[in-house]
Amino acid sequence: MTFTTAVGHADDQGATPGDAEAIAELRAVFAAQRAAVLRDPAPGIEQRRRNLGTLVEVISAYRHRIQEALAADFAVHPAGFADLVEVLGVAGRAAFAAQHLEEWMTPESRLSDPGLLGTAQVEMAYQPKGVIGLISPWNFPFDLSLGPLADMLAAGNRVVIKPSEHTPACSALLRQMMAEAFDPAQVTVVTGGLELARQFPTLPWDHLLYTGNPEVGRLVARAAAENLVPTTLELGGKCPAIVNVDSVTADTVAQIVGAKLVKNGQMCISVDYCLVPREGMARFTELVRAHLRERVPGFAVSPDCTGIITERHLNRLVGLVEEAKARNVEVVQADDASPDAAGRQMPLTLVIDPPDDLALMREEIFGPILPIKPYDRIEDAVSYVNEGERPLGLYVFAQDRDVAEQVLATTVSGGACVNTCAVQGAVPDLGFGGIGRSGHGRHHGFDGFREFSNPRGIVRRGQGDMIDVMFPPYGGLLDMIVASAFGSVDGKVTE
């Protein structure tokens, strides 16, 4: 698979007319930021706070334009949710980083060996990496570009952002916002098509962040590896919700369905499938239908139901459901609405006990389809999860605390929640990221500051050391030290 075919699709292969200009711009701004790093390699705390403050100001000033751009790209997008995540979420991360910068930037003292190093001072200092490339996805166009940007600016870096071509209105607005707020030598947005996407990870960045799917993530990492560029990959996967026998309740369903309806399932840490006790399957299904009927009636045709990003993505989701029906798998549409071509809205659909060879059990769903599979013992549910790829998020619902801790102790995931879903991605001070196929590296808070910093170990020589013992010619004092360490003058360990 080539990089182009991985990120494209049948009707948009090849470069767009403006890609040559976009690539030239990319190389020019990269060179400008490189030169700026040489002039000012370590911005001080006040400059970093100004940059973070500028980010807060611009994201807040463009609040209504952001709502409009999201509605243009998704056909339907709730304005309140845009405010909560795409505006306040970013502003909150930037403000949190500014508040804690002094603490984060303070070098950390480390233990030394006084016998060898005397009074030397040993510390770990975090310095900017330099120029960082940021490839952001379409599902949260502002949060997943400007959120990590806050971490990168806190760490003192310069950044070039390449947003998704699937959200042209949001990408154009993002470009306008950053051009208004920042010198291009500090932050720049480049927009273009598939050829720009292919060229972007080939530059010798000081660090590269890609958020998207594992298939393209692999190609991005391979391209970055040619220049030994360190990467942070925020990928997806099939995030499970394990429901214990004591938690087949309306509250559990409210958490799972609520999270699933966020962005109509187009969220990397959404619940991808549920594992439910066999004896609770019928009750769980009815609780889902009751939740939709009573708490969010008519959701699938309401302004709260985000449209699927493109017609192609909508058709893929419909195809997943049709394949299940063709295999005589029980499919339960949770309300009476049908997929809407104009708004690209789709109702939540339950797929009961699907076989594992169905596409919806092999691929990340990324939409309003919820497979529900039965298990007999909690250990069976854990084994099922562990037999697959390690997920970005894992959610366990259990009133029995011991059961919840058992599940956490016997599974591995990027993040996890107990008795709720997806909240791990909304905590400013909690590092967020994946493991294995779901990615590597962390951003958010101090973890993000460290991710985009170079941890530089520093030794400042003091008095009374024995450093010279490491230098030739050897013998004398070195022999005495070695003999003492091994317990005898001839170097043999005594019994």
Image (spheres, rainbow, N blue to C red):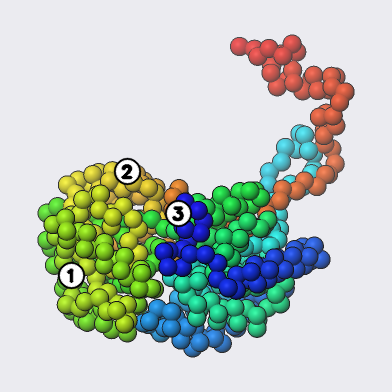
Q: Looking at the picture, tell me which residue is in the foreground, 446 or 462.
A: 446
Residue 333: numbered disc: 1
Which residue does the numbered mark 2 point to in the structure image? 387
Residue 215: numbered disc: 3
- The amino acid sitting under disc 1 is Gln
Q: Nearer the viewer, mark 2 or mark 1?
A: 1
- The amino acid sitting under disc 3 is Glu
Q: Quadrant of residue 264?
A: bottom left
* Residue 52 position within the rendered picture, expressed as x and y whole percent measured from the top left: 63, 75
Q: Determine the residue positioned at 55% across, 67% down.
A: 15
The earlier-in-sequence mark between 2 and 1 is 1
- Residue 393 versus residue 305 in the image, above or below: above
Secondary structure at badge 1 equals: strand
Q: Determine the residue positioned at 30% across, 69% down.
A: 315
303 vs 202, left or right, is left
Spatial separation of the CA atoms under disc 2 and disc 3? 20 Å
Q: How many marks?
A: 3
- The amino acid sitting under disc 2 is Glu
* Residue 325 position within the rendered picture, expressed as x and y whole percent measured from the top left: 17, 61
Secondary structure at badge 2 equals: helix
* Residue 159 position within the rendered picture, expressed as x and y whole percent measured from the top left: 65, 67
The earlier-in-sequence mark between 3 and 1 is 3
